[in-house]
Amino acid sequence: MDNTKINFLDILILLAKSKKFIIIFTLLMSVIAVAYSLLVTERWSSEFTVYPLADMAPLSMAQNLMEGLGIGTQSATARVMNLKNSAILKSLTNTENTIRKYNLIDYFEISEQDSLKAMDKAVRQFHSKMFDVLINDEVQFMTVRLTTKDRHFSREIAQHYLDLLSNYAQYNSNNTGRQRRELLETRVNEITNEMLALAEELKDFQTEHNILEIEEQVKAAIESYGLVLQELLATEVELSYVEKVMPNSIPYKNLVDKRIGILETLKKIETGYGGMPFLLSLDDVNDKIFTVQEKIFGLELYQRILVVISPQLELARIEEVNDMDRLEVIDLPNLPGRRAFPHRAMICVFTFFISFLFASMWVIVRELSSEEDKRKLAMFWNQIFSKKK
């Protein structure tokens, strides 16, 4: 056939003559595509969408000018936050933790004995087959998509990543408010512990020395000491008189014994020994008063410090919330209703048209090639696939 005179009708005639080959080839490839779409493992995608809330503080003059020119500082900030959040989710640490938590090495059927190599392969397969982050540059929405063989498993991992992102924004994001809050909380805890320890020391001291109300107890001890001292003076006066009048008599001996008993009572009041547990000894009353007052003063001082620190702690908590990265969840992780793969109808239709075009092109090339072209083509294939001696 003269190639220089080939037109569209000639091509149609060639295709009609080889219609049997074209139909059989197209149908065969379509059947293979249908079988593939039915046998291939189904995959399901669960995704969630978040929007980073930029700081809503009053804009400066330069920012207002940029907003007026259509250069959105809010959207630029949101884009930076999206890029940061994407980097956090894709980080090696979070990826490896996810792989360990859900045992994805077995999920990917990795049989590598070396744990480091197995983890490296799992990380690559996780990012290439399972995990994807999409950022919409127009509205600055960030969509995280997880694709697995089970729809419930996909949603479970997607929820894990949403929780991870929310926790990072709330607890791990570095801001001055959080640092001040942690510092003040540490100081408040230290002061509280010191107050508890000091209160326990005061309680033990009071228990050990039988102290209830130290001022009242000291007053009672002084009054008791005075009464006994008066009785001692009266007894000594009477004793001196009886000694002159009736020495070595029974009344004299009774007065001597009475004087000895009164002196012992005075000694007990002075030293605190004997059967008077709540009557404070006068010898060390000053030390006890000082010790109790010192501990009470320490408690009062700590209370005053807490009164000063507590408002600062509340302000730091408010500042921490204001400085915190905030996320608005647009869509929660969904339970997918449609498969992410395979798209059976698309595979079948695409395979049908590609097979038809390939068969048609094969017929046209075969019919329009000259004998010389066929011979050269055969030589080409022989050179490619033949073994050199």
Image (tube, grey):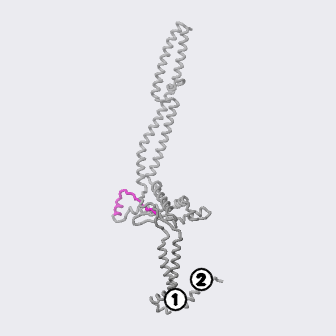
Disc 2 packing (10 Å; few <14; some 14–19; many ≥20): few
Q: Which percent across, then down, holds residue 333?
A: 45, 61
Q: Amino acid at mark 2?
A: Ile
Image location (x, y in percent) of residue 59: 35, 58
Residue under label 1: 367
Q: Which of the two labelled residues, at mark 1 and mark 2, occupies the earlier sequence position?
A: 1
Query: Which residue corresponds to the image point at 53% horizontal and 21% vertical from the top-left?
Result: 267
Residue at x-position 45% and y-position 28%: 215
Q: Is residue 79 above or below residue 36?
A: above
Q: Which contiguous range is marked in magenta? A: 47-67
Q: Which image quarter: residue 308?
A: top left
Q: Residues within 10 Å of mark 1 (few under 14, many from 20)?
A: some
Q: Quadrant of residue 104?
A: bottom right
The C terminus, quarter of image: bottom right
Query: Which SS class for mark 2?
Result: helix
Indicate the secondary structure of the residue bearing disc 1. helix
Residue type beneath disc 1: Glu
Camera-side residue of 175 and 105: 105
Front tag of 1 and 2: 1
Q: Which residue position is annotated with label 2?
A: 384
Instruction: State how far apart marks 1 and 2 are (Cα).
Output: 23 Å
